[in-house]
Image (tube, coloured by chain):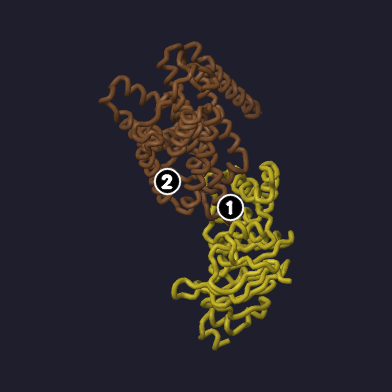
Amino acid sequence: MSEKISVPKKKTVRNLFFFCLLVAVLIFPLAIRLPFLQHLMIMIFVYATVAGGWNIISGYCGQVSLGHVVFFGVGAYTSTLLLQKLGLSPWIGMWFGVASAIVLATFIGLPCFKLAGHYFVIATWAIAEILQTAVINWDWVGGASGLYIPILPESMINFEFHSSKVPYYYISLGMVIGLLALNKAIERSRLGYYFRAIKADPIAARSAGINLTKYKLIAFYVSAIPTAIAGTFYAQYLFFIDPETVLHLMLSVLMIVMVVLGGVGTAWGPVLGAAVLVPLSEFTRIYIGGGGKALDMIIFGILIMIVAEYEPSGVIGLIRRFRSRG
Amino acid sequence: MALLEVNNLTKKFGGLTAVDQVSLSIREGDILGLIGPNGAGKTTLFNCIVGFYACDKGSILYRGKDISRFSSDVICRFGIARTFQIVKSFKGMTVLENIIVASLLRNPSVKQARTEAFEVLDLVGLLDKKDVDSGSLTVEDKKRLEIARALATKPTLLVLDEVMAGLSPTETREAVELVRKIHAQGVTIFLVEHVMEVVMPLSHRVLVLDSGRKIAEGPPAEIARDPNVIRVYLGERYHARS
């Protein structure tokens, strides 16, 4: 009897927690006016979105991609080029970025999904390197020196704000909420069941009537979309992109590190991972400066070792363990 | 017209001819048993039929349509479902979720698929374990899960690859009962078994394979008396004495 009462109670507590969390993130930039802290939150949201994109193809569907950075780069470059060359609003350019990412995903996915395990990882890695090298040597897209986003009057339509970070904050918050909603929708739908089945046992999935190539491609598309959108946002937020920042392999690695730390194949994993790692990396950068460039990576490495050894399902696993105990 | 008709099917692995010009036919409502000693080519023949291997020669007609070039997911959609000799499950997913994956094939919504998954789990007797992680099931339950997953795709023809292997006598009896129950629901069954004791009471017809060749075909009673079959299973000495 007591169990029957405690179940809805637990749910109420849970809902209350999420409601408070939502209120907190909504009033955060109004209450805390320190630009650095606002910037920190924005970066957490951007990385959470990017890592969340990777989590769909690699976390849910089990196809570990080291080339996911290409979708981020394509998103950033497409909207920036359309803005520079044609004066197209980044809000529209963003969707062209998404479309380009989907075309690219088709070209990468069709041949690469025939490869299994490590070979898929290596192939996607190679593609990321090829794209970065190509952009470095392609002057029309800015080459190695990158592209500056044209400075326009600040407005929502121009996707540019100079006097305050608050609009960026809310846009990036919207991206994360969109990502979480997307993940929850996937988990409840046919796609979620199929992705997890493909990850667990592709041969059994196939003999249960699942067309592997089709559903892996769908997973790739769905995961490329938030990543490309985050790319456009990143360009509009920092006003500068170059192959070293938006097409660097390290960004792919960061996505993986965040998801592994937060919890692979879970909706909240990427968000939790980003919330832990982004502040860590920003603070080491501030307190140690340029000289400590790789220190955050050393800490990430140690964290990953700890996670792999003690809690392979990440922060989410820790929370679940804690909750079932309490 | 036969439901499934295999004509002169040949499958080679390099220099080894695993299946050599085997023909068979299954009518709707049949229980066909396929037996043979280790390495006879049973599983290879089986894997060719379900689209796991491409055969080298011959044809496989399902309702008169050649399916020998289709992959296993398409064949499953046609209505031929299989189980795996070495049991497979979607680890990290519960038993219920495992079956939902399969029943989604014939259901547009997850909700309907879930309802049907419950029915299938009830039939195979796994309902009380529905929330268990499929990776932590016992061998017997994993075999039940194999059958349930195949059944959830609503097959016309169910192809069972050594589902009784590794089971205790009691478990085997339960499994035989389960196959009977499934057949009673109108599913045609093609049974591949190593153990004669299982195939004989269940099958309407039995086909015997040895070294990739079909050596006998007929009702179980005839097969049990067939000198070739006795020679293959028990050796020359016993044949001579009988």
Q: Is residue A264 above or below residue B235?
A: above
Q: Is residue A43 above or below residue B182?
A: above
Q: Which residue is mark 2?
A: A124
Rendered location of residue A132, percent (x, y): 38, 40
What's the CA distance linking mark 2 and mark 1? 21 Å
| Image quadrant in which you'd find residue A177 | top right
Can the viewer see residue A261?
Answer: yes
Q: Which chain is brown?
A: A
Give the labeled residue for mark 1: A211
Q: Colour of chain B?
A: yellow
Question: In the displayed image of the protein, which residue is found farthest to the bottom?
Answer: B240
Q: Dividing the image into 4 quarters, which one contains the N terminus of chain B?
A: bottom right
Q: Chain of mark 1?
A: A
Q: What amino acid type should be assigned to the residue bearing mark 1?
A: Asn
Earlier-in-chain disc, 2 versus 1:
2
Image mark count: 2
Residue visible at 51% across and 22% down in the picture = A159
Q: Secondary structure at mark 1?
A: loop
**Residue A309 in view, yes or no:** no
Q: Where residue B138 sits: x, y (%)?
A: 54, 52
The type of residue carrying mark 2 is: Thr
Between marks 2 and 1 in the image, the one whose residue lies nearer the viewer: 2
Label 2 is found on which chain of the structure?
Answer: A
